[in-house]
Image (cartoon, rainbow, N blue to C red):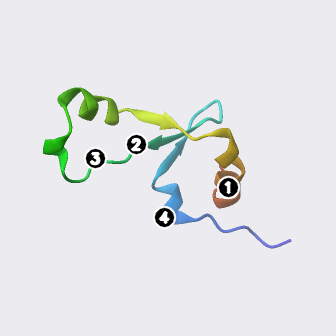
Amino acid sequence: MPKLKTKKAFAKRVKVTKNKKILRSKGSRRHLLSARSEKRKRFLRKKALVQVVDKMTVKRALPYSF
């Protein structure tokens, strides 16, 4: 069986934790930030977990992370 290739662009956008949870950055932080409150921008800084329904997509894109 051939080696599986990792999707490098996707690998740069997510991080797999020690317990195999997948962290991602939140969106809406690139431009038009003056329209958002400081509280909203502060919460957008934090990482979010990838939803369970998207976990199989991530596993296919990052075959050697799990």
Q: Nearer the viewer, residue 21 or 30?
A: 30
Q: Are marks 4 and 3 in contact (CB under 8 Å)?
A: no
Q: Are marks 3 and 2 in contact (CB under 8 Å)?
A: yes
Query: Which residue position is annotated with label 4?
Result: 9
Residue at 32% across, 29% down:
43
Q: CA distance from mark 4 to mark 3?
A: 19 Å
Query: Which residue position is annotated with label 3?
Result: 29
- Going by the numbered disc 4, the residue's amino acid type is Ala
Query: Which residue position is annotated with label 1?
Result: 57
Determine whether 6 is above or below 28 in the image.
below
Q: Are marks 3 and 1 in contact (CB under 8 Å)?
A: no
Q: Position of residue 39 (x, y in %)?
A: 24, 26
Could you tell which of marks 4 and 3 lies nearer the N-terminus?
Answer: 4
- Going by the numbered disc 2, the residue's amino acid type is Lys
Q: CA distance from mark 3 to mark 1?
A: 24 Å
Query: Which residue position is annotated with label 2?
Result: 26
Could you tell which of marks 4 and 1 lies nearer the N-terminus?
Answer: 4
Q: Position of residue 20 (x, y in %)?
A: 65, 36
- Going by the numbered disc 3, the residue's amino acid type is Arg
Q: Nearer the viewer, residue 38 or 16?
A: 38
Q: CA distance from mark 3 to mark 2?
A: 8 Å
In what quadrant of the picture does the N terminus appear? bottom right
Looking at the rendering, which quadrant does residue 35 occupy? top left
Could you tell which of marks 4 and 2 lies nearer the N-terminus?
Answer: 4
Q: CA distance from mark 2 to mark 1?
A: 18 Å
- Going by the numbered disc 1, the residue's amino acid type is Thr
Secondary structure, mark 1, is helix
Crowd class of label 1 (few under 14; some 14 to 19; many from 20; radius 10 Å): few
